[in-house]
Image: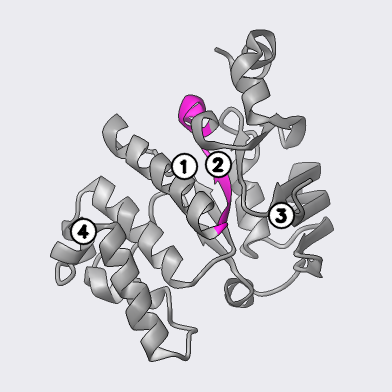
C-alpha cells in the first residue's frame, strides 16, 4: 500500500463564522495524483486555501509526512515542500517570465540549484524559454499556466496543490498540462492534489479521487472506479 504523504482529519474551515468545510478527511498518497471533484460551491478551493495556510482552520488536523502543518505560515509550508498554484494562475504581470520563475526559488540558498531549476523549466516549457524576457502580461492564457507551473517547480515541491489548471484553456493545452502532471508523477514521484471542474481530464490522470458536496466528502475511491462506474459517476458527477 502506498504511504500517505498528506493526511487531513476532521478539517473544519471557512470565512468568518460560516464554515465551508465540515469534518473533511482526505489522504494524498505519496507519488500519486489525487483529484478533488465536485460542483461549484462544494468547498474545493477553500480546501486548498486551508491546506496551503491561506485560511486558518477552526478544527481538524493536517499533516505532511507525519509532520503537523496546522497553523504553519504559508512560506514555511513552501519550505517543507507544499506548493499551491491557485486558480487564475497568480503570476505577476509586470515581471518578466524569468523574474516570475525566480520568485519560486526565493527561499533557496543555492544559486547553482536555482540555475539548474531554471534550465529544467525551460526544457519542459520551450515557449517560456523563448519568452523569458517578456512581461508575464504579454503571455497567452496557456503560457501563463505554464509559467505558474514552472514557478511552482522552482520551489522543488513534494506536493503540488493545483486549483483548476484547465480553466480558460483550449482542450489541446489542457491535455498538455494533464500529460505533464502524469510525467512528473512517474519520473519524479511528485504528489499532486488536483482540483478540477473538467472531470474527464482529471480522471484521465488521477490515481485516486475525492468527490465533495456542500463542504463534505461524499465519495473517496480509486479514479478508475469513478471512471468505470456509470451509476456512481452519474449520481455524484452528473454525467
**First reached walking from the N terminus: tag 2 or tag 4:** 4
Residue in front for this viewpoint, 61 or 114: 114
Q: Is residue 225 left or right of residue 102?
A: right
Q: Quadrant of the C terminus?
A: top right
In the displayed structure, 213 sits above or below 86; it is: above
Q: Are marks 1 and 2 in contact (CB under 8 Å)?
A: yes
Q: Is residue 124 left or right of residue 106?
A: left
**First reached walking from the N terminus: tag 1 or tag 2:** 1
Mark 3 residue element: loop
**First reached walking from the N terminus: tag 1 or tag 3:** 3
The residue lying at 42 percent from left, 71 percent from top is 154
| Structural distance between the alpha carbons of marks 4 and 1 | 23 Å
The residue lying at 51 percent from left, 36 percent from top is 205
Res 24 quadrant in image: top right
Circle nearer the viewer, 1 or 3: 1
Q: Is residue 67 left or right of residue 156?
A: right
Residue 164 badge: 1
Mark 2 nearby-residue class (10 Å; few <14, some 14–19, many ≥20): many
Q: Is residue 56 left or right of residue 181?
A: right
Mark 3 nearby-residue class (10 Å; few <14, some 14–19, many ≥20): few
Residue 126 badge: 4
In the displayed structure, 142 sits above or below 54; it is: above
Residue marked by disc 2 = 195
| Structural distance between the alpha carbons of marks 1 and 2 | 6 Å
Res 58 quadrant in image: bottom right
Mark 2 residue element: strand
Residue 151: x, y in percent?
39, 66
Residue marked by disc 3 = 16
> Where does the magenta region start and end?
189-202
Amino acid at each position: 500500500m502506498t504511504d500517505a504523504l498528506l493526511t487531513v482529519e476532521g478539517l473544519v474551515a471557512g470565512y468568518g463564522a460560516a464554515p465551508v468545510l465540515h469534518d473533511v478527511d482526505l489522504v494524498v498518497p505519496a507519488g500519486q495524483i489525487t483529484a478533488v471533484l465536485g460542483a461549484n460551491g462544494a468547498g474545493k478551493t477553500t480546501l486548498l486555501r486551508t491546506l496551503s495556510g491561506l485560511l486558518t482552520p477552526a478544527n481538524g488536523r493536517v499533516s505532511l509526512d507525519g509532520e503537523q502543518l496546522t497553523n504553519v505560515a504559508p512560506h514555511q509550508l513552501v519550505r517543507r515542500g507544499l506548493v499551491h498554484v491557485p486558480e487564475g494562475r497568480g503570476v505577476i504581470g509586470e515581471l518578466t517570465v524569468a523574474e516570475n520563475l525566480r520568485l519560486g526559488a526565493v527561499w533557496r540558498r543555492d544559486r547553482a540549484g536555482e540555475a539548474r531549476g531554471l534550465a529544467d523549466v525551460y526544457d519542459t516549457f520551450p515557449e517560456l524559454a523563448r519568452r523569458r524576457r517578456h512581461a508575464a502580461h504579454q503571455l497567452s492564457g496557456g503560457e501563463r499556466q505554464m509559467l505558474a507551473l514552472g514557478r511552482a517547480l522552482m520551489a522543488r515541491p513534494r506536493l503540488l496543490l493545483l486549483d483548476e489548471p484547465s480553466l480558460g484553456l483550449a482542450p489541446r493545452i489542457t491535455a498538455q498540462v494533464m500529460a505533464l502532471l502524469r510525467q512528473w508523477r512517474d519520473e519524479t514521484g511528485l504528489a499532486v492534489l488536483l482540483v478540477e471542474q473538467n472531470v474527464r481530464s482529471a480522471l484521465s490522470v488521477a490515481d485516486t479521487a475525492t468527490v465533495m458536496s456542500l463542504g463534505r466528502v461524499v465519495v473517496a475511491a480509486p479514479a478508475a472506479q469513478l471512471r468505470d462506474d456509470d451509476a456512481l459517476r452519474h449520481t455524484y458527477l452528473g454525467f
